Structures are given as structure tokens and as C-alpha cells.
Image: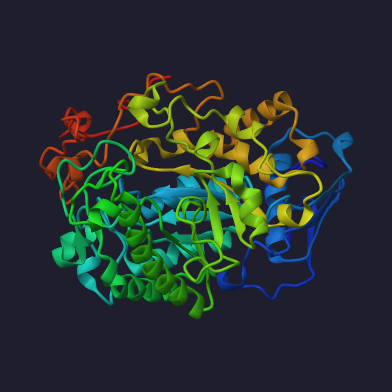
């Protein structure tokens, strides 16, 4: 095939069809479906560029795709004959290089996901979109086995199964696999909107207690799937595992509130009956998660959960957390060596420095849960293997890679690319390149600036490397109104005041945006 753009070595003559001949050789082209693409897939390639030809040799189609990604900046450069020959012998340091997107608190159209996330992910060799499908505020993805569980904000803010399949196909064509997440049994108050009998402590106010773990919910609305309704969870998972061909499915298992299962009666941690209460609650959760794990494993898939199942709940080496499961090391990343030594695979996902919503609009942790902003430099400067000794080769090999997280309480479609890029690209380079090649932050800054120019040329709007987000225009918007027919059923616009135990209304910061059409211009100031 021919490269269809000007290389400058030799000059491309429009209309002549001339230019360097591109030869692609793939050793094993058998993986042509998403189901066979995993963190173990060989993504290596060798790219050789001369003044007259381009040669790509790769073990798989994925390596060939990344070689083409590497050609793009070369093709866009002002290139003289003396810039060649070029030879790149390349392979990723980690097989899991991802971004989490939360579509439960705010909704993002399939076009936004494609253009603002998947396309730039392909350009930066990121290969996992971790899709946090629903949360307590909305469930936007079609469920056919139990249609009442399809609870989007509005008919215009939902995903059909055909749209989900299209996203899977679009991503796969770009070397990206979609890892779906259905957080269970916590973060499921939205199930109560379908059937109140499915959930405990539904819409309980105040939704927060006197401090962790004395809460009904991490944020409103309160409510979570009842421990004895695990059949609803496994039924949902079976349908979704048929829909998503990825061999890993996340069941989250995060921020389960035992007080919610206690009929909204708070048992303080200093109460003499608390240890017994906690053990009874743990037993309920262990039984629930055992059945969830069994459903996932029996379907031939691997279960992924957040690390609290290991660190806080103590389910390690049990049927609730089978060996070989994947742990997202989020709350206690320093314990990753212990997780891997117990037979678990780990994806590094620490709040600090990988959460992209930390500090949006404020430097205060009190106003944003985790301020100040996690900058690109802090992401780039953190080594995923920082807590491993140099001799622990076996344990290090169980670290599959890492992810930045775009939780969407503070995130809108109009600012998605601005918030994510180029910060996610800092992680992309850190996870792809050898550790020895990612120590010079000045050189990395120059590369990220060039990448931002490329993304801007593609019509995206990346933030500057110096962005601090102190003047981000809004603070907390769990889906405030945007106007327009069938697009105005947001959680905070329709809910009654959601008071915490301090008498603070969670939805109050969104009130000033009710009825305002939110655009990039009125949400961001640098």
C-alpha cells in the first residue's frame, strides 16, 4: 500500500500516487476479534523508514497498528532526506494502558467517546477503555433480560446494545479493548428506581453518617442492592458478558455500606456491638461476592474488583476473590506487592496521582475530595513499580499496567478532552516506554507539547501543561440541566435536597447551573 500524505523524503506529488512504499508483515494475524485480545497479546513491532520505503514487521495486528501510530508524527514532520534512515524496535512495558470513564454521573455520547477518548487513545498507544457503565444516579445501558433496569437520565441520554457493540468494534479497530464495569452491590441506588424491593436504605437522608464507615452512601442517592438479591446481579452480568467480548469484567465491589444493609441504622465503630455487626455484614458480602465471582468465572471470564476486597475486607484467597482475579490498586497501591505475592494480578490506579477529577475547580481537598489537581508531571513522575523491590521479578510481572480515572461528578462532554488530555498521555508514555527512557521530565514535556499540537489539529481541545484548574468554573455537577427536549432529567435537578449529617445539600453547587446550557467557554478559565 502507499502512504497517502506528504513525507518530504522524497517529496510527495499530489495526484501522482507516488510516495514511499509501505510494506506490513504480520507473523500471526489470527486474532481478529476482541475476545482474543488481552494484556498478554504481543504488541511489539519493528518500523524501518528509508527515503523510498517504509517497512513494518509485527507479531500481531496490534503491533502493526502501533507502528502506524508511530509513523504519524514522522509523517507530519518537516522531513529532509537526511532524516532517514529511521529504525524503531518497539514493545510496550505494560500490556494494560487505560482510561476509566464514568457514564453514570454524567452521560457522554458515543461520538464523544469515539472522538474525545478512543481516537486520541489510539494515537498514544493506550489500549483499555475501562467503562464504568452506571452508578447510583443513572443506568444508561440497555438491559433486555430485565428492561426496568435500563434507567437513563432521559431517552436522549442512553446507550442501546447496538451502540455498545459499535463502540466495542470501533475501539478494537484502533487496538483498544473495552473493559466494562458493573459495580455490585454498592453504587446501585438506581436499581431502586426500577424496583424499590431490590434495594435497602433507598434515598435515605441524611445520606452520610458521622464518618467512615458510618455512612449510608459515599454520595447520594443512598441505596444499594440487597444482599439476598444476588440473582439480579448475576443475571445482569450474564447478559453483559454476552454483550462485551472482553475476557475481563469488573464487578467493582467498592464502597459497600454495611449500615445500609442494617435497615439504615448506624452502628458506630466505637459501639461495643460493632465488631459482631461488621463480621455479620462481611459474611453477607462474602456470600454475595462468591456468587458473583462464580458467575464470572463459569462464563470463562476473569473478575476484576477494586483493591478494598483484598486490603479492607480481607477476602483474599477465598471464593469471594479467586486467585488470578485482577485488583485495581486504588486505595492502597503501596500494598500491590502483597497482592501479587498472593496470586492476584494488579492494575495500578491510585487516587494520587491517577484520578483526573482531583482538584477540579479548587486546590482544596475538602471541596473536591482530593485536591489539588493531579498534574501531568505528577502522573509521569510516579512509577507503577515504585513499591516493588528490584529482585521481586515474579511479583512485578503480575502488575499488568495502570489507568487514569475520569470520574464524572465534575466532568462534562464539553470539557472531556480538556480534562483528560494531555494528562492521560503522560501515563501512556510511562506505561509504554522503558523505565530508563521516562526519567527526563523536560524531554517528556516537549513531546507532550507536540502531541497537544497534533490533537488540536484533530479538532480536540487539550489543556496546557501548566494547567492548575484553580479557576475551573464549576465545582460539583452530578448532571445539571443542559436544556433541550428529552435531555433534562438530571439527578440534582429532580431530587429533593440531599442533606448530609452536617446539613449540607450535596446538590446545592449545581443549582446555579439549572437551565444553563453548559459549553466549554462557560465552564473553563485557565
Between residues 88 and 445, which one lies in front from this camera angle?
445
When the figure is inspected, residue 173 is found, relative to residue 238, above or below; the finding is above
Q: Quadrant of residue 192?
A: bottom left
Residue 25 or 449: which is nearer the viewer? 449
Residue 3 appears in view: no
Asked if residue 318 shows in the view, the reply is: yes
Residue sitting at 17 percent across and 32 percent down? 505
- Which color mode does the image show? rainbow
Residue 439 higher or lower than 258, as above or below: above
User: Which residue occupies the extreme bottom position in the image?
Assistant: 298
* Residue 405: x %, y % from top left: 48, 44
Q: Nearer the viewer, residue 11 or 52?
A: 52
Q: Is residue 95 left or right of residue 207?
A: right
User: In the picture, which quadrant includes the C terminus?
Assistant: top left
In this rendering, position of residue 125 left or right of residue 520: right
Q: Position of residue 271 (x, y in %)?
A: 28, 44
Measured as percent of width and height from the top left, residue 358 is found at: 44, 32
What percent of the width, then of the height, locates residue 155?
A: 20, 58
Q: Give the residue drawn at x 14%, y 63%.
A: 196
Q: Residue at x 39, y 22 (%)?
A: 364
Residue under the point 75% across and 28% down? 440
User: Would you identify the image quadrant in which residue 228 lies?
Assistant: bottom left
Amino acid at each position: 500500500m502507499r502512504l497517502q500524505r506528504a513525507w518530504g523524503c522524497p517529496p510527495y506529488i499530489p495526484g501522482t500516487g507516488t510516495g514511499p512504499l509501505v510494506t506490513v508483515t504480520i507473523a500471526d494475524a489470527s486474532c481478529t476479534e476482541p475476545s482474543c485480545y488481552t494484556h498478554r497479546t504481543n504488541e511489539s513491532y519493528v518500523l524501518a523508514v528509508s527515503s523510498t520505503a517504509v517497512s513494518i514487521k509485527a507479531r500481531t495486528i496490534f503491533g502493526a497498528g502501533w507502528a502506524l501510530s508511530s509513523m504519524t508524527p514522522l509523517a507530519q514532520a518537516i522531513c529532509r532526506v537526511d532524516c532517514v534512515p529511521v529504525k524503531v524496535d518497539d514493545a510496550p512495558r505494560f500490556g494494560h494502558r487505560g482510561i476509566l470513564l464514568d457514564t453514570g454521573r454524567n452521560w457522554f455520547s458515543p461520538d464523544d467517546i469515539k472522538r474525545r477518548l478512543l481516537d486520541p487513545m489510539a494515537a498514544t498507544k493506550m489500549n483499555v477503555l475501562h467503562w464504568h457503565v452506571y452508578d447510583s444516579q443513572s443506568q444508561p445501558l440497555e438491559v433486555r433480560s430485565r428492561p426496568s433496569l435500563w434507567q437513563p437520565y432521559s431517552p436522549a441520554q442512553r446507550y442501546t446494545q447496538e451502540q455498545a457493540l459499535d463502540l466495542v468494534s470501533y475501539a478494537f479497530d484502533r487496538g483498544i479493548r473495552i473493559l466494562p464495569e458493573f459495580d455490585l452491590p454498592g453504587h446501585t441506588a438506581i436499581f431502586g428506581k426500577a424496583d424499590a424491593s431490590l434495594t435497602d436504605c433507598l434515598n435515605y437522608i441524611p445520606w452520610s453518617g458521622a464518618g467512615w464507615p458510618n455512612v449510608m452512601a459515599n454520595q447520594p442517592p443512598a441505596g444499594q442492592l440487597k444482599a439476598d438479591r444476588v440473582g439480579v446481579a448475576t443475571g445482569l452480568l450474564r447478559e453483559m458478558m454476552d454483550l462485551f467480548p472482553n475476557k475481563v469484567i469488573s464487578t467493582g465491589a467498592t464502597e459497600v455500606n454495611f449500615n445500609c444493609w442494617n435497615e439504615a441504622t448506624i452502628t458506630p465503630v466505637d459501639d461495643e456491638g460493632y465488631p459482631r455487626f461488621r463480621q455479620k455484614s462481611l459474611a453477607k458480602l462474602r456470600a454475595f461476592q462468591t456468587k458473583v465471582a462464580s458467575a464470572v468465572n463459569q462464563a470463562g471470564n476473569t473478575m476484576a474488583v477494586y483493591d478494598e476486597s483484598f486490603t479492607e475486607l480481607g477476602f483474599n484467597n477465598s471464593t469471594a476473590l479467586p486467585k488470578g482475579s485482577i485488583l485495581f490498586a486504588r486505595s492502597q497501591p503501596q500494598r500491590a506487592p502483597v497482592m501479587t505475592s498472593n496470586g492476584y494480578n494488579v492494575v495500578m490506579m491510585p487516587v494520587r496521582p491517577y484520578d483526573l477529577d482531583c482538584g477540579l475547580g479548587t486546590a482544596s481537598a475538602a471541596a473536591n475530595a482530593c485536591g489539588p489537581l493531579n498534574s501531568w508531571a505528577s502522573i509521569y513522575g510516579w512509577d507503577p513499580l515504585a513499591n516493588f523491590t528490584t529482585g521481586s521479578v515474579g511479583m512485578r510481572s503480575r502488575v499488568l499496567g495502570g489507568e487514569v480515572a475520569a470520574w464524572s461528578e465534575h466532568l462534562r462532554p464539553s470539557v472531556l478532552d480538556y480534562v483528560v488530555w494531555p494528562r492521560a498521555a503522560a501515563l501512556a508514555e510511562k506505561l509504554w516506554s522503558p523505565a530508563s527512557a521516562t526519567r527526563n521530565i523536560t524531554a517528556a514535556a516537549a513531546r507532550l507539547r507536540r502531541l497537544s499540537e497534533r490533537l488540536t489539529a484533530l479538532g480536540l481541545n487539550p489543556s496546557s501543561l501548566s494547567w492548575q484548574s484553580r479557576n475551573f468554573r464549576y465545582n460539583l455537577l452530578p448532571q445539571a440541566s443542559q436544556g433541550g427536549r428529552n435531555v433534562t432529567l438530571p439527578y440534582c435537578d429532580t431530587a429533593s435536597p440531599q442533606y448530609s449529617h452536617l446539613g449540607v445539600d450535596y446538590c446545592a453547587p449545581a443549582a446555579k447551573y439549572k437551565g444553563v446550557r453548559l459549553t466549554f467557554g462557560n465552564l473553563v478559565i485557565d
